[in-house]
Amino acid sequence: MKYPEIGLATRRLVCFNDKGFCRYYVGVRESQKPCEWAYFSIETLELLKKHAGARADRKDLWEYAKRHDLLRPKYLRKVGWRLLVQAIFDKDVARFIQSRFSELKVSEARYGDLLGRADELYPKYLGYLRQMISPIHDE
């Protein structure tokens, strides 16, 4: 499919099974929190398929997190940002992955480059997350 707003032809959902992740073109641009691409692991894709069609209320999610002493949803992006920067050391790519476009000035040519770099570096981030989480599961 061709997306003229980004000057790119790609499928909406692209999975890199050999690298363990997918990216999904969201294309939300005209909101307070734009989201161009959603990057996630293959395991997350399976969870999304399993729960497709289920509805979740923002308040219910917040209460569930609080009840189980989990990180509140509003902090996930902030924590994700810090871990992403620690893992890949490239703030432009990290900004691109998190759709922080107000902090990133992107020309059409640079956009394709950032997409390719994000596809290249995202597995490094997933590996870093797994490394950070594994000591927790070992306890």
Image (tube, helix red, strand yellow):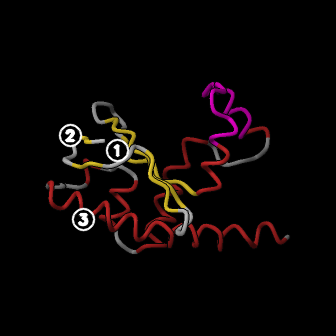
Q: Residues within 10 Å of mark 1 (few under 14, many from 20)?
A: some
Q: Is residue 82 above or below residue 45?
A: below
Outermost right residue: 139
Q: Is residue 123 above or below residue 27?
A: below
At a point 34% along the width and 66% down the height, the residue shown is 91
Residue 70 % position (x, y): 71, 48
Residue 4 % position (x, y): 19, 40
Q: Regarding mark 2 in the picture, which secondary structure is present there?
A: loop
Q: Residues within 10 Å of mark 2 (few under 14, many from 20)?
A: few
Specify the amino acid type for callout 1.
Glu
At a point 74% along the width and 35% down the height, the residue shown is 64
Specify the amino acid type for callout 2.
Glu
- The residue wearing badge 2 is 5
Specify the amino acid type for callout 3.
Asp
Identify the mark nearer the N-term, 1 or 3: 1
Q: Which residue is nearer to you in this view: 28 or 94?
A: 28
Q: Which residues are magenta?
A: 48-65
* Main secondary structure of the magenta stretch: helix
Q: Which residue is nearer to you in this view: 135 or 22?
A: 22
**Which quadrant holds residue 68?**
top right
Q: Which residue is nearer to you in this view: 77 or 129?
A: 129
Which mark is drawn over residue 113?
3
* CA distance for labels 1 and 3: 15 Å
Identify the mark nearer the N-term, 2 or 1: 2
In magenta stretch: residue 138: no
Q: Are marks 1 and 3 in contact (CB under 8 Å)?
A: no
Residue 93 % position (x, y): 33, 64
Whether residue 90 sits left or right of residue 103 in the image: it is right
Which mark is drawn over residue 36?
1
Q: Is residue 16 above or below residue 77?
A: below
Residue 88 % position (x, y): 43, 73
